[in-house]
């Protein structure tokens, strides 16, 4: 592969750059840059802007309203968005369930759901993990029993990211308790407004409400919401996880956080000199920067090598999250004693009180603890290593 | 004996829910718990008998702090008894010790050491707060940062510059300042490990000559010695937190079932649990070393040992807290489980009185 971008790709980057700088609402970018709390409308507003431009679905085929961009173009787009402080696209509809519907869904499902995903009319959530089924996802117990034209669903999902906003959930359910565990699973699209569904917040270490428990109590789901064939849900789930892992590298966002870290370290003083001039600290920033440079090239190699992400995507998940975590850790260290503060009230956009210490210090520790999730979610990094050792190394 | 009684008390009366309630209260600690600590004799462990204490050593403090660490106790023991108490004990005049230490030991007076400033990072000699002579006394102006439990303390111990430039080692003095004095403005906030801290602004705060703690212009050695005692205590607290967090993680590995067996049966996780245990043992060794050597009269030996211990605790605390969260999976990032709260405390101990980098430099400078 050529490590230099082609002329066309350069031009594309400039086009994306200009559009994002002109159209990303300042208040949203400001929240992202300053680690303020995002509300539902922030994500939806940005997604609708991209929708209007026709850039909302970089990875979808043209016939469904996607951009059909090359993997390199998708990367350029994500990179520019990340650097500009755009909120990440909520992946559950656009990146995760849509490819499943496109590849395995019925005509009705495509016609009904895909336009609503594109326009952000429906907010989707992922219904995979259960209290007893995390890394061992295939052991899931949420039960769906066919009764006439409906499935009756009972059970519980957990760690459902932003499920409090969700209109729809793609959900793995057990439709056959006698088959081998992977074979009794089906893939259902569930209306979150159905009677019998309740959503309970789980508060994380930063005292934010980002994840939820979701309970199903005799929830009626129309049989037309079954994706593909009953009992094949595991195949679709694995297909989907591959899509999750390429997006999870988050190179653009890490570049942005690295720039912010350097700016902070230039302002903070150690022994009367800028912290960034301190060899101990600077070397650790360098190490992360080098890892990030390598990750970007690795990502481009993975993207160039094949049309569908394979097990190599696990490398991106592991390194991407390690880098994100290292950056939050260095940022927390950079702000020094002011990292001790914990003021969730100051993370509201409408808050105009006095900062404690430099403004950038306010959320440093909260973000550090929040980001511990990244090596756990989306298939823990241990599971990713199992995937590599089994499917790539043949161990 | 002392250790057993603290452990018993915390086990019985300081469970996760009780602690949660205390953190949510306005001042962030419990008067009832504090009174109980006074009754148990914890608040005067290291003070002399003449001052209502028990004449204990840094090793006795180590025992207490380890137990407080096991319980992630948020009461202002560290700020009042260890850091504040040590500074008064080491630098106070007879009259100051008589007036302050018995009150502390009885739980009637809280202290807070206001040493840091917005630009000081961890450097005790970086002092811009000014103390100008005014008749027999002084007038203080400046901003002290991240003062642990500063809003609850009756007396503040403030470092201020009586001579020299912002980072000079000479020209620093310590003052005892009533928190309620005119001109003292205190803004309290929560810390991420469940405690309270404050920004303290001093505007023309007048203090008498009798409020000087130690020698005028020459407080840095006293400050450093107090900080060293406090650091050795923090190391002990960290070891207690590490023990408890490792135990919780081990329990989780043994009980959490995935793939039809406990996740602790997977070798990849077993080795990490072993590394966590080794981190804890190495930290315990260094905390013990610090508690013994901090009593040495050899300044460089003290500095070297205490810095080494703080480095060990900083690195091991980070490793253990990160691994504990990871091995707990999603539960590790839930605020409803104790594990994450131990991780928060361990992480913030690294940001108190000098992080790994700061002490790496001190260690190197101690020869």
Image (tube, coloured by chain):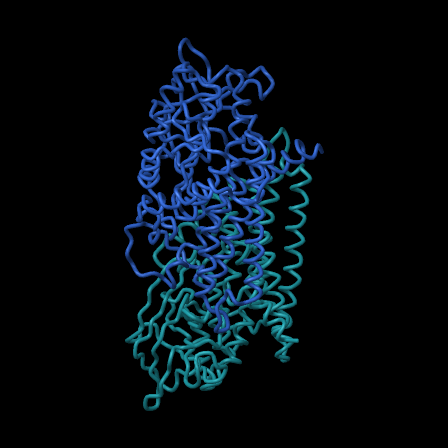
| Residue A162 location (% of width, % of height) | 39, 36
Is A241 situated above or below A320?
above
Question: In the rendered picture, chain B carries what hue?
Answer: cyan
Is B89 situated above or below B332?
below
Q: In the displayed structure, does residue B200 sit left or right of residue A269? A: left
| Residue B174 location (% of width, % of height) | 44, 80
Q: Quadrant of the N terminus of chain B?
A: bottom right
Is A304 situated above or below B283?
above
Taking depth in this image into account, of B169 and A10 the one nearest to the observer is: A10
Furthest residue in direction front, as rendered: A7
Taking depth in this image into account, of B167 and B155 the one nearest to the observer is: B167
Report the label total: 0
Question: In the rendered picture, chain A carries what hue?
Answer: blue
Taking depth in this image into account, of B252 and A344 the one nearest to the observer is: A344
| Residue A372 location (% of width, % of height) | 51, 46
Tell me if I can see residue B29 in this picture. no
Q: Quadrant of the C terminus of chain B?
A: bottom right
Q: In the displayed structure, does residue B30 sit left or right of residue B89? A: left
Q: Quadrant of residue B201?
A: bottom left
Residue at 36 percent across and 31 percent down: it is A123
Residue at 31 percent across and 73 percent down: it is B184
Q: In the displayed structure, does residue B227 sit left or right of residue A36? A: right
Q: Quadrant of residue B366?
A: bottom right
């Amino acid at each position: 592969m050529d490590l230099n971008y082609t002329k066309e790709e350069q031009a594309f980057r400039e086009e994306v750059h200009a559009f994002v700088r002109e159209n990303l609402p300042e208040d949203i970018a400001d929240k992202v840059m300053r680690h303020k709390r995002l509300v539902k409308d922030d994500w939806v507003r940005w997604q609708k802007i991209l929708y209007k431009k026709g850039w909302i679905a970089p990875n979808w085929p043209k016939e469904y309203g996607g951009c059909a961009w090359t993997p390199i173009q998708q990367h350029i787009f994500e990179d520019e968005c990340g650097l500009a402080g755009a909120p990440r696209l909520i992946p559950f509809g656009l990146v995760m369930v849509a490819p499943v519907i496109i590849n395995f869904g019925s005509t009705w499902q495509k016609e009904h759901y895909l336009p609503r995903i594109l326009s952000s009319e429906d907010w989707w959530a992922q219904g995979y993990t259960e209290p007893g089924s995390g890394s061992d996802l295939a052991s899931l117990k949420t039960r769906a029993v066919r009764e006439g034209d409906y499935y009756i669903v009972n059970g519980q999902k957990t760690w459902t990211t932003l499920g409090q906003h969700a209109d729809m959930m793609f959900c793995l359910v057990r439709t056959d308790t006698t088959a081998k565990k992977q074979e009794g699973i089906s893939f259902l699209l569930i209306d979150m407004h159905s009677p019998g569904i309740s959503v309970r917040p789980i508060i994380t270490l930063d005292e934010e409400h980002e994840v939820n428990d979701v309970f199903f109590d005799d929830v009626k789901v129309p049989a037309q919401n079954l994706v593909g064939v009953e009992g094949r849900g595991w195949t679709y789930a694995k297909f989907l996880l591959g899509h999750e892992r390429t997006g999870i590298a988050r190179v653009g966002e890490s570049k942005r956080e690295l720039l912010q870290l350097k700016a902070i370290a230039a302002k903070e003083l150690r022994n009367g000199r800028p912290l960034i001039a301190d060899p101990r600290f600077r070397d650790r920033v360098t190490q992360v920067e080098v890892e990030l440079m390598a990750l970007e090239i690795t990502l481009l190699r993975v993207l160039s090598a094949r049309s569908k992400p394979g097990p190599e995507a696990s490398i991106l998940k592991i390194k991407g999250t390690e880098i994100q975590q290292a950056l939050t850790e260095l940022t927390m260290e950079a702000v020094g004693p002011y990292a001790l503060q914990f003021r969730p009230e100051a993370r509201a956009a409408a808050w105009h009180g006095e900062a404690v210490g430099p403004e950038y210090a306010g959320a440093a520790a909260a973000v550090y603890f929040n980001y511990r999730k990244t090596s756990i979610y989306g298939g823990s990094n241990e599971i990713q290593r199992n995937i590599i050792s089994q499917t790539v190394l043949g161990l | 004996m002392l250790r057993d009684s603290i452990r018993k008390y915390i086990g019985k009366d300081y469970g996760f829910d009780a602690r949660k309630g205390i953190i949510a209260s306005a001042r962030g600690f419990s008067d009832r718990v504090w009174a109980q600590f006074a009754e148990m004799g914890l608040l005067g462990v290291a003070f002399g008998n003449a001052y209502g204490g028990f004449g204990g050593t840094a090793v006795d403090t180590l025992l207490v702090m380890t137990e407080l660490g096991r319980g992630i106790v948020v009461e202002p023991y560290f700020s009042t008894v260890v850091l504040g108490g040590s500074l008064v004990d080491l630098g106070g005049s007879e009259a100051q010790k008589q007036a302050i230490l018995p009150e502390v030991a009885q739980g009637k007076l809280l202290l807070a050491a206001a040493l840091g400033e917005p630009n000081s990072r961890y450097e005790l000699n970086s002092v811009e707060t000014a103390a100008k002579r005014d008749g027999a006394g002084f007038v203080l102006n400046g901003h002290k940062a991240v003062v642990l439990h500063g809003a609850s303390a009756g007396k503040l111990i403030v470092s201020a510059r009586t001579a020299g430039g912002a980072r000079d080692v000479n020209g620093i003095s310590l003052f005892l300042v009533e928190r309620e004095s005119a001109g003292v403005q205190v803004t309290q906030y929560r810390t991420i490990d469940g405690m309270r801290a404050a920004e303290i602004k001093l505007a023309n705060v007048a203090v008498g000559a009798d409020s000087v703690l130690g020698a005028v212009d020459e407080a840095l050695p006293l400050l450093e010695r107090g900080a060293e005692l406090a650091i050795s205590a923090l190391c002990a607290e960290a070891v207690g937190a590490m023990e408890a967090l490792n135990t919780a993680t081990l329990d989780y590995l043994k009980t959490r079932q995935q793939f039809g067996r406990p996740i602790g049966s997977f070798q990849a996780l077993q080795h990490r649990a072993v590394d966590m245990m080794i981190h804890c043992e190495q930290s315990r060794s260094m905390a013990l070393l610090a508690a013994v050597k901090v009593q040495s009269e050899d300044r460089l030996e003290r500095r070297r040992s205490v810095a080494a211990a703080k480095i060990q605790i900083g690195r091991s605390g980070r490793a253990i807290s990160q691994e504990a969260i990871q091995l707990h999976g999603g539960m590790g990032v839930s605020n409803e489980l104790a594990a994450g709260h131990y991780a928060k405390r361990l992480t913030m101990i690294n940001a108190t009185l000098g992080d790994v980098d700061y002490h790496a430099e001190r260690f190197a400078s101690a020869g």
